[in-house]
Amino acid sequence: MLITTMSLFIIMTIYLIPLSTEQEKMLPTNLELEYITSLGNHSIYLLNENNYLVKTKILLDGKTLEENIKTMLRNLTIAKDSKFPNALKAIIPEKTKVNQVTVTDSIAVLDFSKEFLQIEKDKEEKMIEAIVYSLTGLKGVDGVTIKVEGETLTKLPQSNKMLDPVLTRKIGINKRYDLTSTKDINKVVIYYTETIDDSSFYVPVTKYLNDARDKISIIIEELTTSYIYEPNLSSLINENTVLLNQEQEDDLMILNFNDALFDANGILKEEVLYTISYSVFDNYDVNTMALYVNGKEASIVKKTDLP
């Protein structure tokens, strides 16, 4: 029995040690992307198969803001060894190099190599949106200036559309124009969901409408409609959901809904909570949102706590 026991111990030791070593080797790679580990903590925007920019996450571990910006830009650049799902693609042209990154007074100045200009016409505006929305999600970055070989990019390379010297989220993302007039234009960012590899991703769409209502009313109406124009995008908010009233107190947005906000089991789904939260924070200068159902607190979300 002693010999048998010792033999089993030796066999188990031989098999377990390589397994642990292999797990240690795999760990740094698996920590890179949120859709693998759910540990990613900073957003970047990648292109889906329908030419929409999709919010996803990567883990940033640089010691400086400039290092983290370079990591973001590297993930936004087309590469043969991409680790993202097949349905999501980087958008900056392959072989583009980042010559320099500096951050001064919350403005990130990016200097790219000339390959940056080799972008297809139908993707050039999306590329700028992806860069600006990704980088301004970082604490300490409010705007972006883009240079190519030391020269500030003042217009898009293919369409010649003019660009501001400092770009902010005011440029919009995944823009859609539902206009009948040039007067009373309301600009609203609405977050939808898209399912990729059985996981939910969030997709912002900037809509320009002739609608003078408060932005939150437009957001909830768009998310509760039974028909969504954007291909493959959806909303899990019940079409019977009604925003009963709203209130903004300094840094806080309070929204009170009827009980259709809950699912059939009386649960507030994560996708419902986040589509409303992301939409509110992109349209209002608040850092906390409180959701109520028939006057009773359902959830409180802080901007800094969003995944």
Image (cartoon, rainbow, N blue to C red):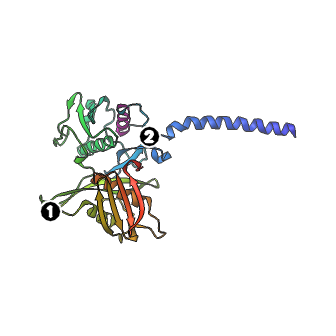
Residue plotted at (32% across, 58% down) = 253
What label sits on residue 59 in the rendered view?
2
Q: Is 232 placed left or right of 164 in the picture?
A: right
**Of tags 2 and 1, which is closer to the observer?**
2
Q: Is 41 placed left or right of 230 in the picture?
A: right
Q: Is residue 18 visible?
A: yes
Pick the front one: 287 or 189: 287
73 falls in the magenta region = yes
Q: Is residue 232 visible?
A: no
Q: Look at the picture and state if 96 lies above or below 182.
A: above
What label sits on residue 180 in the rendered view?
1
Of helix, strand and loop, which mostly describes the magenta segment?
helix
Residue plotted at (17% across, 37% down) = 154
Pick the front one: 201 or 281: 281
- Find the residue positioned furthest to the right: 1
Label 1 neighbour load within 10 Å: few <14, some 14-19, many 20+: few
Magenta residues (range): 66-78
* Residue 117 on image: x %, y %: 24, 35
Label 2 neighbour load within 10 Å: few <14, some 14-19, many 20+: some
Residue plotted at (44% across, 62% down) = 269
Q: Is 307 placed left or right of 135 in the picture?
A: right
Type of the residue with mark 2 = Leu
Q: Secondary structure at mark 1?
A: loop
